[in-house]
Image: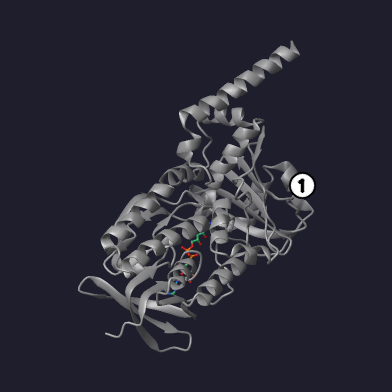
Amino acid sequence: MNKKFDAIVVGARCAGSPTAMLLARQGYRVLLVDRATFPSDTVSTHILHPLGVSTLSRWGLLDRLTATGCPPIHTYTFDFGPFTIAGSPGTPAAPLAYCPRRTILDKLLVDAAAESGAEVREGFAVDQVLIEDGCVVGIRGRSKQGGSIVEHADIVVGADGRHSVVAEAVRPEHYDDKPPLLAGYYTYWSGLPMEGRFEQYIREHRGLAAVATHDDQTLVIAGWPYAEFTENKKDIEGNYRRTIELAPMFADRLRGARQEARFAGTAVPNYFRKPYGPGWVLVGDAGYNKDFITAQGIMDAFRHAELCAVALAAVFSGTRSFEDAMGDYHHARDAQVKAMYEFTCLLATLEPPPPDMQQLFGAIHGNQKAMDGFARLNAGTTSPAEFFAPENVDAIMAAAASSSHKGAAHAG
Ligand SMILES: Cc1cc2nc3c(=O)[nH]c(=O)nc-3n(C[C@H](O)[C@H](O)[C@H](O)COP(=O)(O)OP(=O)(O)OC[C@H]3O[C@@H](n4cnc5c(N)ncnc54)[C@H](O)[C@@H]3O)c2cc1C
């Protein structure tokens, strides 16, 4: 068998292009294929939290993104109706988030993979994953010009999203599955300045968020529980507008803006898949997926591409066995995201928080250190385990009690 490649990566967006790029940078022979051509859009909003931005910076790609004129985001706000929490989502080393259009971000990533030496085939659809004696050995696909093409490699990487053809072929173990919880729809507006804020509005059984992106446009997404998905699909615009009216001051601002695109949106399932087996690995949404309410997907795809590429390089160089290296990748991926996965699924129900959580949110309000902590929690900068640790919660509650005590003393 003529094996031209160490790895074939199927899917060339946030997970696939970085995996291909990082392997190619180490001199491995990589074929990166996608049935899409770039630049092209996909159904996804595109907040990139500060830790995702710092990953781009580590790869030497952040300057390319900022050169596209993507506006930086320095503050996340959470409007609960009676009060708003506003804080900084990042760290001193990585303070900013961005919300780059996928047409721009994904193209930048594919180009970086090609520059690093990966062979890139756009407009190439994989129809079949080739398996011999229980081991994946390659792919069969076709380019837009037609004609079936077979390629072989030591490893086939499924970076091909939620409907992964690689996962479908290898049937990996699933765990911690949860059904879709939320339906979200978004569009873009001009004339809606955001001044560096990512604004989120939390209402009973409804959520709303707004953030500036390329071309002086602002992305506005509205969401409702998945139980209403089918019914509300009959009138997406009406439901979107009624959700916006739940935040009257924001609705007033939107009245002065102009809608620039059609509505897009969906609902997604939540799952983990075992991300490796004989001759194959999964990265990005192909390997695990969660609701978009906390906007973790792109950042996670970046970080897991990095973990996956490190593990594969150790296998290709002969320093580690496939089972050991990929077992560590699996473990590190899950350890990094598990607590956030549970928190995300909780938020995605759009149920009012339990009373103790409501009390905590009230206590966070007005305490800048705690508000920064809350913004970092939602950005995935701080883990839920750290934020909800009893010492942190107790400190926030004590600070609130002491300031209301002082307030009462002043009033007296
Ligand atoms: C409504 C919505 C809003 C979201 N908002 C955010 C957000 O604000 N921030 C955030 O971080 N994440 C967000 N996400 C999640 C984010 O979009 C994903 O986590 C991210 O796109 C995953 O990247 P990926 O590379 O794994 O997969 P994808 O982006 O799905 O890319 C998979 C690629 O594989 C290709 N492919 C598939 N099958 C084949 C085949 N057979 N042959 C060849 N190519 C194939 C596809 O063409 C595609 O280009 C959102 C998701 C949704 C649905």
Quarter in which the C terminus is drawn: top right
Taking the image as shown, residue 118 lies to the left or right of residue 250, namely left
Task: Name the residue tied to disc 1.
Answer: 252
Residue 54 lies, in percent from the top left, at 56, 55
Query: Residue, x 40% and y 74% (percent of image)?
Result: 28
Residue 356: tell me if it is visible.
no
In the image, residue 352 above or below residue 128: above
Query: Residue, x 69% and y 45% (percent of image)?
Result: 245
**Mark 1 CB within 8 Å of ligand 1:** no
Q: Nearer the viewer, residue 293 or 233?
A: 293
Residue 37 lies, in percent from the top left, at 54, 77
Classify mark 1: residues with Cα within 10 Å, few (<14), some (14-19) or many (20+): few
Residue 301 lies, in percent from the top left, at 47, 59
Instruction: For mark 1, give the secondary structure.
Output: helix
Q: How is the image coloured?
A: one colour
Taking the image as shown, residue 16 lies to the left or right of residue 140, namely right
